[in-house]
Image (tube, rainbow, N blue to C red):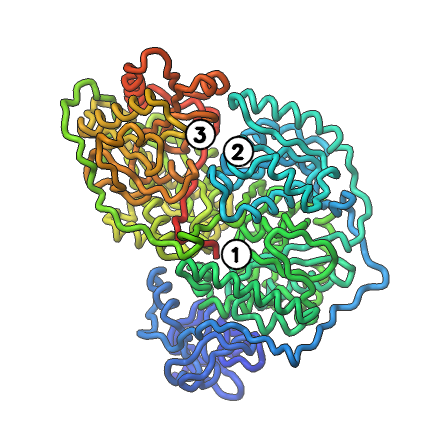
Amino acid sequence: MRERAVDFEEVGRLPGARDNVAIAVRRLEAGMRIRYGGSSFALSHTVLEGHRFAVRGIGEGEALLSWGLPFGRALREMRPGEYACNAKILRVLGERRVDFELPEAPNFRDDPLRPHVLDEQGFRPGEQVPLYGEPGTFMGYGRGARGAGTRNYVVVLGLTSRTGPYARALERRLSGLADGFDGIVAVSHTEGGEDRPPNNLDLLLRTLAGFMVHPNVGAVLAVDDGYGAVTGSALRRYMLENGYPLREVTHSFLTLEGGFEQELRRGERVIRGWLAGVAAARRTAQPLSRLRLALQCGGSDAFSGISANPLVAWVARELLRHGGSANLAETDELIGAERYVLENVRDLETARRFLATIERFKELVGRHGHTAEGNPSGGNNYRGLYNIAIKSIGAARKKDPDVRLDHVIRYAERMREPGYYFMDSPGNDLESVAGQVASGANLIFFTTGNGSITNFPFVPTIKVVSTTGRYRLLTKEMDVNAGAYLDGTPMEELGRDTFDLTLRVASGERTAGEWAGHSQVSIWRNWRRGPGDGVPRRPPDRDGRPLPVGRIEPAGLSFRGIPTPRGHAADRVGLIMPTSLCAGQISLRIAARLEESGLGEGKVSRFVALPHTEGCGVSGGHSEELYARTVLGYLSHPSVGAALLLEHGCEKTHNDYFRARLAENGLDPEGFGWASIQLDGGIERVARRVEEWFEAALAGMGEVEREPAGPEHLRIGLHAAGPLSEEAAEAFARLALRLAAAGGTVVIPEGSPALDGLRGRVLLRVTLAYGQRPAAPGLHVMEAPTGDWMEIATGLGAAGVGVMLAHVVGRPLQAHRLVPLLQASSDPATLERCGEDLDVALRGDPSRWHATLERAILEAASGRRAPRLARRGYTGFQLTRGPLGVSM
């Protein structure tokens, strides 16, 4: 009996009337017959929700169309009902281990991205939507030249990555003092942590300046440590030179000088003095012309361009009619949609600036060996965004066709007048959001298909999800179900309701993200340059063989370690490893919850999460290899007793990606836990899933027992921050040679002053790539593509070191979240100012210093000494991107 055909409207959507491929609104099984255009056809294969199938015959070489725009070319004749697949989608679905038969070969190829050619002779200026005669208002905070605030926060702003842990610690310390205002929040990020000026210095200063004067900020404490190019004095000078209204915000610049606890007390005194004044601010009626929307998308799917993005475009159009502003971002996610964006533009110069921005972005990523084709994540692909062209066509729908593009601005450049803006930024969601906030956006619209849960610390985020199914799965994390449009609600009705919500949120109603209470910040990350600003080079492969140092008897070098399959370890921890930046803050929250529960007492010493900024919105190639190697290094670290990978759910490097990497490296994926914030149903549900996995994993694990272990189980990382005296250099050299010659492993980052005392004794060369495990014990030098200590420390941990030791001059370093970092100093000024934070004071006879350091290492490896700053929460973790990594 022939199967009954279903009407096309039940199973598919055509974004444009001219389209020849449709989007499946749910999973459609192979063989299903579909009535369309007076006839019917059968599906060639099972088609996933959000993926496309042909509704008309498509000739070889003919364009596949969505929204009437081409996104690929047929490799052969395609019949109605064929599953549209390019080579990448077949690879992605194979990696995802789908439970149905895939087509044997692709039936279309991506069109190469060609520069859009502007018809300057035929150009006609566009028209903006007309203004209302009586613009509306919202209840906000009048901030004079800074604009109008939708919130009222005290912000602790870490000016560089080095002061981020201080900002977070001060936030925790003052968490109960927000009475009468929205809160005290830390803003920490990954940038400016090197002593040399970064390539993104101007961009970084512009972003920090925008944060300082943001209208949602009632007062701000800007914190630096006095080192590098990004200091309070440099930022103040930049703001005054560029006309930022710094005098209109209550602020203070604080340079860390003394011990950690002492500086926390100093920061607390400053902020306590502001509290009454911040709480005295009151909401008053503010014109909607002072409302500035950031339009952002993350975890997009095939329906984002049909429901969620057109919905926020409707709201932005309505706000423009009240004289307000909207900010569209993500440069690489408009490549391929230039024609649509420029159908309505203010003037020829604005059109030129838009196209020049696109081409400049292409040049930047091209210099690093990449193209915009690398932008779509694995989650994008899995949910139906086959390539950058089709992703861009949907992303551009955040601009309504009736709305005119008025302004093109640099990343974090301030919006100084009403209108519709395009801001240059990468496709990385959080990096792009940071620029929009710095430009003055006081409300964020974040559209998502997969269910991105990200939020910003002091600007509310309204999250709009594209389908009803995802909204139901993540109802506690989402604010608006744009899927209602797919279900039959008119866009006009949905738009009015969402605009009403916009006004309520701007006036103080809390969003789902604010109730959830988590947020994170990532500024457009630094990129490397080659010699003379040329093309950066990929580092050579390293053999992992140690430097020759001879052999000695290992007398006195035993410690009490914990036996593991990978040798004796200094600790045994439960690890939650986020597979991308958007899972980072949730991993921290879950780890803290597990700590408080007392789970695994006696079996693991603690639970650790390692949040970072990678895994999504970054180029592939060498930087992806670095990232994957580093993550695998921690999953297999000897001090990790049980490890779970936590995906956000829409990243490039999702759980299935790491299952494949583990298997390729001889590690059994079944030995690890797996959880997904999006697929498991949101924060609370995924937290329970993680708890249940650790309960089961630890149930069969024995109590921690230590036993004598020889030097062959010692894996030590050595470093020095600041100049080493001859005596300290000699002590570190003697220590390194003794440990390595006795059979231990010593890893020192290239360029570290800790190598100074070894010059002339050992023929030094780099033996390990960043995060590479040694092929044999001995003395090793690890590649360090960055001068940022936290990135260096992360590479040392991935290389397997169980204890780190650093000599510091000036200020102490951030401790590592997982690997103990002992900090020593022989510098009198450092000992006087920061002695309470140091673990070893090198005084007295220098000939005994190496023995003092050795004793401290053995005590830490035996679990008898915990680093002071780690106990106080002055910790961090951050991966490097290497010379070829850029944000996308």
**Residue denoted by label 3:** 813
**How many C-alpha atoms fall within 10 Å of the one at disc 2: few (<14), some, or many (≥20)?**
many
Label 3, secondary structure: give it. loop
Q: Which residue is mark 2?
A: 163
Which of disc 1 and disc 2 is earlier in sequence? Answer: 2
Residue lying furthest bottom in this view?
38
Which residue matches tag 1? 426
Q: Report the amino acid beneath label 2.
A: Thr
Q: Is residue 315 above or below residue 506?
A: below
Q: Is residue 681 left or right of residue 569?
A: right
User: Which badge, 1 or 3, is on the more N-terminal residue?
Assistant: 1
The correct choice, above or below, for 381 with respect to 618 in the image is below
Q: Tell me, yes or no, whether the two marked residues, 3 and 2, touch with CB atoms within 8 Å.
A: no
Left or right: residue 481 versus residue 629 is right
Q: Identify the element where label 2 is drawn.
A: loop
Residue 131 circle label? none
Q: Position of residue 339 (x, y in %)?
A: 58, 74
The answer to whether the residue labelled 2 contacts the one labelled 1, judged by CB atoms less than 8 Å apart, is no
